[in-house]
Amino acid sequence: MTQTPLAGIKVLDLTQIYQGPYATFLMAQAGAEVIKIEPPGGERLRPPAHARGSMAFAMLNANKLSITLNLKAEAARDLFLELVADADLVVENFGPGAMERLGLGWETLKTVNPRLIYVSGTGFGLSGPDHDLLAMDHTVQAAVGLLAATGGPDDPPTRAGGAPSDIMGGVHMYAGAMTALLGRHQTGEGTRVEVSMMDAMYFNLSTELSTLYATGKPPPKNRNRSPSTVVPYSIYRCSDGRYVAVICIQERHWHALAKLMGHPALVDDPRFSRKERFANEAELNRIVGEWMLGLPQEEAFALLREAKIPAAPVRRVQDVYGNAHMLARGSLIAANHPGMGEVYLPTSPLRFSNFNAAQYAFYPELGSANQMVLGERLGRDDETLAQLAEAGAI
Amino acid sequence: MTQTPLAGIKVLDLTQIYQGPYATFLMAQAGAEVIKIEPPGGERLRPPAHARGSMAFAMLNANKLSITLNLKAEAARDLFLELVADADLVVENFGPGAMERLGLGWETLKTVNPRLIYVSGTGFGLSGPDHDLLAMDHTVQAAVGLLAATGGPDDPPTRAGGAPSDIMGGVHMYAGAMTALLGRHQTGEGTRVEVSMMDAMYFNLSTELSTLYATGKPPPKNRNRSPSTVVPYSIYRCSDGRYVAVICIQERHWHALAKLMGHPALVDDPRFSRKERFANEAELNRIVGEWMLGLPQEEAFALLREAKIPAAPVRRVQDVYGNAHMLARGSLIAANHPGMGEVYLPTSPLRFSNFNAAQYAFYPELGSANQMVLGERLGRDDETLAQLAEAGAI
């Protein structure tokens, strides 16, 4: 274990909400210096001074430095360009064209620093007829077919939980940034990196697209499973009203389940052979469901686990927050934040046997690195910084 | 535009189904040489010889080479180790411990090639009490709280459409691989990279975790929106039975919507002020819903778009397949595959202004690179290859 994998990489982070901040969170945890540049009022997700704090903001902004720049003010843009000259990465997820309207588009920035890698995250990309559409996770879920693929057969379009378009977009932004840094090792030149949330989410529908292609018909919606032909594959209710998810991806899983339920002869029942099982799914689910309903969740899961059948307890968000497995392996840390109190915070999902991660640092207070970055690094004296603040530029 | 960003990078790809293959798909499209190593019967997702073809397999295996190795045979393991000596990356998403049981774990492979980067994708990671659990997208959705966060308030746990845990895991595997390659530039040493689908999916629940933290209570489930306080934020039915998704993230969006609906005075209605709107969401949704129900989807969306209100048509999977926007920008290509016929296939979501992508190549036929890789590169003559095939090793 020697160092962090991104030691020495300098990132200027103009991002907000979820998508872009997740990309720069991954950078910061991998050891890059991430300077989060916020408007003087703070990023949109940053909680107001006396509010309880935002878990999402805390999660996504760990290990970053914060400076304030009002990029609508010329003096702030000049400071930004000074930082760009020495940066490896600029990362932004503004609406389409916003950076160009500020006079800070890629075409401008690359003249300041030809080695610069500029990462743009948008809903629909920088080209194509829909590139100018405003986008949020919600509208991308609609546009890419996810709302229509979620819920039961008679349900109206249903939102997939979480913010998958945002986080999927964010990790693709990170992936593109890393790829561009590798490319720069070969060419010595920077590049613009472009990620569209819609492009990034297309692959999520691999099963639905496969069914459409194979049958010529859109797959029926199902609340309990994806449109594959694997059986048993469902969510079953337990005696305590909680649920367990099961998927018998291989024949041996089904055989183990039949044995576990005390019905080993079912594997020889022609209705439940490999070929016929999908057609008789309802009857098989009735049998499995009856067995599951006789056990509390924890016991059902323990038995399935012991029998090496792919299964998991259906956890609620309050069960996931502080999850024992994630805590044990350091994917979550228990911390005492001066403002937030006792909290669980996640670390980077990227782990390396031969590199260290950055030591976890709480999200920065607004502008807390102004002195270090604008003062010491760019050489502005206290009086100048006070004037810039007075003028609303920082 | 000079070259691909990953030119010269050699990948040994042991992956299957969705998670791992998405990681190596991104590598192949970025110009790495990806040798897909399949058992002699083909990867699990590969369609049988006379079947119609699998859209998911075609999507996720473009630009790869295919060789066959039965890693349970010693002769095949020896060939694999010869390839490892000259590889940059080994990528696998087998079940926990599978590579160790084959005698091909990271501890072994790094003695063969100290610069090797070994990428492991699993459901729950390589440590912690649940690390040995078998995992599929379905069970990870359960374990990480996504099933419980999807659907309406009275619905049982509901599956989020698509395979988000798989694809999210896969792009994190790619991201970790790129990070490790960058780290290797500094240290000269390889590393194991570890990605857990559960870790990667935790961030997806940022909003739900924020609500839990802020209120101390788990967020109510909602079919139409995430548990934030933004209003209007829903899915609305149109006169043709289709739907449009709308989210007014800023005040100006709500003002524009009120004007568009012909009710500009609503913005001064105290029930719909910034502070009160969330409490009166049902009434506001009734008003918006009534307006939307008077228009067909296409017209409603066009009006919302013109008024710069974040909105999108709720597309079905058959609307997304061949989507005009994605085709126009090259995110989808229309191709005529010799076996599959006329198909739309997606390209990498990672785009670079100053690097080329690999020219799109269809997924490989099983073992079609055996001669090139095992014959020419490793120097096995035809007789030896025939014997290996006869013995079931390739």
Image (spheres, coloured by chain):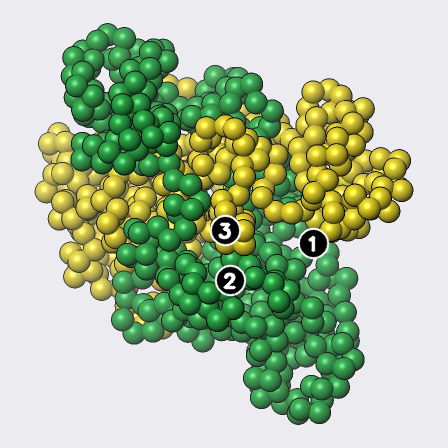
Chain colours: A green, B yellow
Residue pictured at 46% horizontal, 68% vertical: A337
Q: Which mark is residue A58?
A: 2
Q: Which chain does the numbered disc 3 sit on?
A: B
Residue designated by label 3: B216
Residue pictured at 55% horizontal, 59% vertical: A54
Q: Secondary structure at mark 3?
A: loop
Q: How busy is the neighbourhood of tag 3: few (under 14 within 10 Å), some, or many (20 plus)?
A: few
First in sequence: mark 1 vs mark 2? 2
Residue designated by label 1: A95
Which quarter of the image is occupied by the N terminus of chain A?
bottom left
Amino acid type shown at disc 3: Gly
Residue pictured at 63% horizontal, 51% vertical: A122
Q: Which chain does the numbered disc 2 sit on?
A: A
Vertical comparison of B362 with B115: above or below: above
Q: Secondary structure at mark 2?
A: helix
Q: Which mark is residue A23?
A: none
Quadrant of the image occupied by residue A285: top left
Query: Do the residues at pointers 1 and 2 share their chain?
Result: yes
Badge count: 3
Q: Are marks 3 and 2 in contact (CB under 8 Å)?
A: no
Amino acid type shown at disc 2: Ala
Residue B349 visible in the current orientation: no
Q: How busy is the neighbourhood of tag 2: few (under 14 within 10 Å), some, or many (20 plus)?
A: many
Relative to A294, is B268 on the left or the right? right
x and y percentages locating residue A238 in the rendered image: 33, 27
